Image (tube, coloured by chain):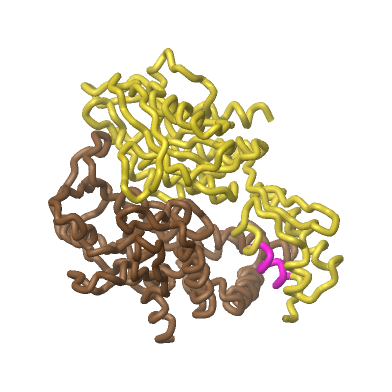
Chain colours: A brown, B yellow
């Protein structure tokens, strides 16, 4: 294959962005293009410059025999603010209010662009945490969990509230639902999570935090370490949440069913970007 | 911004592959780089050639005032065979067999690489079908549905078997489960699917087809047109399935719980690629 630099860069850009957080040996490209390592290194230098100046992400190169190149998605503060603004705009649409003060969010969770954007924001916040698995609760957390896991290059484990026959042996815990005060059960198939894994917990909505407490308890059964909890939306009206170490993309408050109004504001995720 | 061609191509490749099946006006790049339309068109010609010769996908350009460029993921027969082979290899691991002849598949469904690969195969089969929404059944179909929808640039609607309070008004149908012969209920929030939509149904496992029949009945309630049904795995041991118009990635057969063996073979998806 005789490719010019510009053609090689098209191929390499597609190859790397398709494999975020995956170490690609330089020899992959050296062999593919039958080029000297120095030419390929120069290609990567160009790619890296564009990625970094355009805020697409980092391109890390490691030297040595097992050396290679890794694309690490990472967004800027400006981009994070745009993503949060866009999400808040969508969330603010009045007709989301459902009986009982719930918010209709299935359209946002079913929107792959929104999930992709927000996953980049989440991945940027937890980039340095050495995550082995993304854990979520069925069903609305699954799309975001997958979008995040894809960028972290790790698998997803889905906790269920019903016991499906097709999961094999499971571990379960009981927990108290923060909203209804009922005792509920949460189940994870033994095989979906390695003992001692470092996990990032992702979910759609954080109310009183009963579910997340259940997840944390369930993770203890797997000797897993919860390195973070990230939710799309948190309810600001909850004062005494049992745990406080989480990130959110948006907060909703002052839900007024009678007048069909509620307020939306940025979640605490922007604090991460403000720290610089 | 003064970018050279090679730098522009890095940016454009990332931009287009991030937005499959989305018409990007040429002016996006003309303005971004402050370049003549003819230069940008030449950039796109190079990109198109690499994409097509490398089997990444098609790059379609449309002329005129509203003209632009669209990246259409499309894989080759060779790539499709590789994907099916890889999936079969994973699926063939003997320790997947669960009591009752079920297969443990949560690791595959939770693997974002596997879901991504297979979604490219599915998208290639249904590329010309003008799909408005990908429909799936909670919970194991969700990751594949999202991977497919992301590449088709359409939303996902998730059918549930329980009635969650946070969905608003719903439409439900009863159906007979093909395996257990029990009457079950299937529910879709009214707001998640537009009336008259053209839908692609995606699911993880096709046994007798009771669930898919339920989906088809539910789609009638929305005056939706089912333009295709695609499943990860079908059970070959079922002879009289009610509907036959579907695609599968793999088939399992001869499940022998006593000896803990089963056979796996390619699904009918390869017929599409063999037609050329």
Relative horizontal placement of residue B108, taking residue B116 as reference (left or right)? left
Is residue A34 visible in this depiction of the protein?
A: no
Query: Residue at left 78%, top 70%?
Result: B30
Towards the viewer: B171 or B129: B171
Q: What is the magenta range?
A: B6-13
Residue B16, image x and y in percent?
65, 59
Towards the viewer: A27 or A203: A203
Q: Taking B91 as reference, is B5 above or below it?
A: below
Residue A176, image x and y in percent?
14, 56
Relative horizontal placement of residue A6, taking residue A250 as reference (left or right)? right
The outermost residue toward the front is A258
Query: Residue at left 32%, top 59%?
Result: A101
Residue B9, image x and y in percent?
71, 66
Is residue A244 visible in this depiction of the protein?
A: yes
Residue A274, image x and y in percent?
43, 85
Count of labels in the image? 0
Q: Taking A253 as reference, is A33 above or below it?
A: above
Query: Residue at left 51%, top 67%?
Result: A89
The outermost residue toward the top is B240
């Amino acid at each position: 294959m005789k490719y010019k630099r510009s053609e090689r860069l098209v191929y390499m850009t597609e190859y790397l962005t398709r494999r975020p957080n995956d170490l690609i040996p330089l020899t992959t490209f050296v062999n593919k293009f039958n080029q000297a390592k120095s030419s390929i290194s120069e290609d990567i230098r160009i790619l890296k410059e564009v990625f970094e100046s355009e805020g697409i992400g980092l391109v890390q190169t490691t030297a040595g025999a097992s050396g290679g190149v890794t694309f690490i998605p990472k967004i800027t503060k400006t981009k994070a603010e745009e993503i949060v603004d866009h999400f808040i705009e969508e969330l603010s649409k009045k007709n989301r209010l459902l009986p009982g003060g719930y918010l209709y969010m299935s359209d946002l969770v079913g929107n792959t662009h929104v999930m992709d954007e927000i996953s980049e924001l989440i991945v940027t916040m937890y980039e340095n945490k050495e995550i082995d698995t993304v854990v979520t609760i069925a069903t609305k957390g699954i799309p975001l969990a997958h979008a995040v896991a894809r960028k972290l290059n790790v698998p997803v484990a889905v906790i269920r509230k019903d016991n499906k026959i097709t999961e094999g042996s499971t571990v379960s815990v009981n927990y108290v639902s923060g909203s209804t005060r009922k005792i509920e059960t949460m189940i994870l198939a033994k095989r979906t999570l390695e003992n001692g894994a470092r996990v990032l917990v992702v979910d759609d909505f954080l109310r009183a935090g009963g579910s997340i407490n259940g997840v944390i308890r369930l993770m203890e059964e797997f000797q897993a370490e919860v390195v973070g909890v990230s939710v799309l939306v948190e309810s600001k009206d909850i004062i005494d949440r049992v745990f406080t170490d989480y990130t959110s993309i948006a907060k909703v408050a002052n839900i007024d069913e009678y007048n069909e109004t509620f307020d939306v504001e940025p979640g605490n995720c922007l604090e991460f970007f403000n720290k610089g």
